[in-house]
Every structure is written in structure tokens, then in C-alpha cells.
Amino acid sequence: MEIYLIYLFLLVVGCIVGFTTGALGLGGGFIMVPTLIYIFQNLGISDDYVVAMAVGTSLSVIFLTSLNSAYSHSKYGNIIWKYSLLLGFSGILGTFAGVKIVTNYISGDLHRILFGIMLIILSLNMAFNKTNPKIESNQNVNYLPVLLCGFLIGVLSSMFGIGGGTIAIPILTIFLKTPIKKSIGTSLGMMVIISLSGFLGYLLSSVEIVGSYKYLNFIGYVSVSAALSIGVMSLIFSRYGAKISNNINSGVLKKFFGIILMFVGLTMII
């Protein structure tokens, strides 16, 4: 694949990721990770490293887009900050465990299958849960379940490079009884914290880079060039997504979210 085609492809992916982050609070990792795996494999990167490199690069972009989108959602009052902070800081502990698992104990094929299964389970939860919860930002918080959820989100986020939104939104909606729009905003506030710690973990991990893909400028498991290419366009388009999210019916948003998760999950397994 020619280098200019790679960067053009990454710019297009960045537009999609930014819009998805702003509109659905997903972080775009479910798009970036499979895309980056495909690119890195075609460049000849070893299967021993390809998934971890895709995840590390994805998390670096997610940090930038979630920071920008969280700012936009905060203006609409869609972030429950005490949930974001509790989930985020407990999630940091989980990210260290997740990075350790990926870089030392899990194979690439198993990694992809687990990712797909997780997305399918979450999509079914979203599809069959019929509650329409109402919650105010000053509601009393049951700290232990929120902290445990944050740790789990951190582990899965750093394992699969999805920033936590794909996991956090169903947890907030189904288990913590948060409306979908506030779940999206709150997950973005949490993702700023979790994605930063996850991407730093991959950035600071040592790996030997050899071959023609050096021009992607890897630091640890993070491709700086790929991250910037996707990240710049993501920052631009995430604000448009946030505006649309605030005006879409919650039920439609929830169904659309579930369909995306199911499609990507089946794709990863197949």
C-alpha cells in the first residue's frame, strides 16, 4: 500500500471517528482498532505486536477526541461529573492491568475474538433493556458499584483500545440507571482520564521496531504519525457529532448504538 494512500485513508477514518465520538460517546476505537490492524498487517508488522500497536495508537486518538467532545457535551449539561471522576480514576488502575494482559499474556487471534464477543453481549443488553431511567446530577452515589465498574471499564478499555465508552454507556444506562444522553456525556468525561493513562502505558512500553513501517514513527506501541492523522480530523468532526447528539431522540440513539455494536462484534469474530 502506497504511503499517500495510507495517510488519506487515515484522514477519512479520522472524520468518521470524530463524528462518532461526539454523537455516540464511543471514542471511535471500534472503528480505529480493526482499521489499524488491517493497515499494520499489510505493512508487515508481526502478529505478535499488531493488535497492541493498533490499541495503543487508538487510545492516543481517543484521548484527544474525548477531551474535545467532553467540552462540547459539558456545555449542554450532559456530563455527571462525579460519575466521570469516580469511573475515571478507578479506571486508571484497571488500565494498568489491561495493558499488562495485552502485552504479555494474550494472543492476537484470541484478542480479536474476545473483543467481538464483548461487543455482541453489550449490544444485546442495549437492545433488550426497555428502561427509560431518570437521574439528576445531584443524586446520591453508591460509591462501591461505581468504583468497581470503573475498574472493569479500565481493564477492558486498555485491552481493546475502545476508550471505555462502548462499555461505560451500557453500564451507566443499564446498571446505574442513567439516561442515554447523560450516559454519553458522562462516559466522555471518564474517557479523558482512562484513555490518557492507557495510551501512556503503551507509549512507555518498549518494543523493537524494524522494517519499512518505521516511517509511521512509533514510540513504544503508538504510531505518532497515524495518531496525528486521525486525531486532527477527529477533533474537527467531534463537535458536529456532539451537536447532533443533543438533538436526536434518546430511543433512536440507543437503538443505533446497539446496531453498531452488534455489527462490529460479528465482523471481529468472522
Image (tube, rainbow, N blue to C red):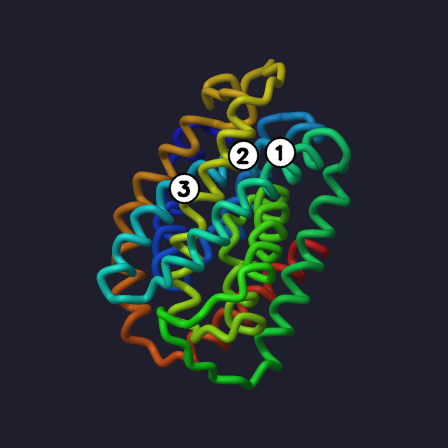
- Residue 19 position, x and y percent, is 35, 57
Q: Residue at x 35, y 51 (%)?
A: 18
- Residue 112's mark? none
Position above or below: 149 against 233: below
- Residue 240 position, x and y percent, is 26, 59
Residue type (three-letter) at the residue carrying disc 3: Phe
Residue that extends furthest to the left in the rendered view of this protein: 75
**Crowding at mark 2 (Cα within 10 Å: few <14, some 14-19, many 20+):** many
Kindly state the secondary structure of the residue where label 3 is placed: helix
Q: Residue at x 51, y 17 (%)?
A: 214
Which residue is identified by label 2? 56
Which residue is identified by label 3? 63
> Which residue is nearer to you in this view: 264 or 137?
137
Badge 1 or badge 3: first in the primary sequence:
1
CB atoms of marks 1 and 2 within 8 Å: yes
Which residue is identified by label 1? 52
Q: Residue at x 53, y 84 (%)?
A: 131
- Residue 217 position, x and y percent, is 45, 20
Kindly state the secondary structure of the residue where label 2 is placed: helix
**Crowding at mark 3 (Cα within 10 Å: few <14, some 14-19, many 20+):** many
Image quadrant assignment for residue 75: bottom left
Assign the C terminus to one quadrant of the image.
bottom right
Position above or below: 23 against 234: below
**Crowding at mark 1 (Cα within 10 Å: few <14, some 14-19, many 20+):** many
Residue type (three-letter) at the residue carrying disc 1: Ala
Position above or below: 187 against 249: above
Residue type (three-letter) at the residue carrying disc 2: Gly
Query: Gap in Å between the C-alphas at discs 1 and 3?
Result: 17 Å
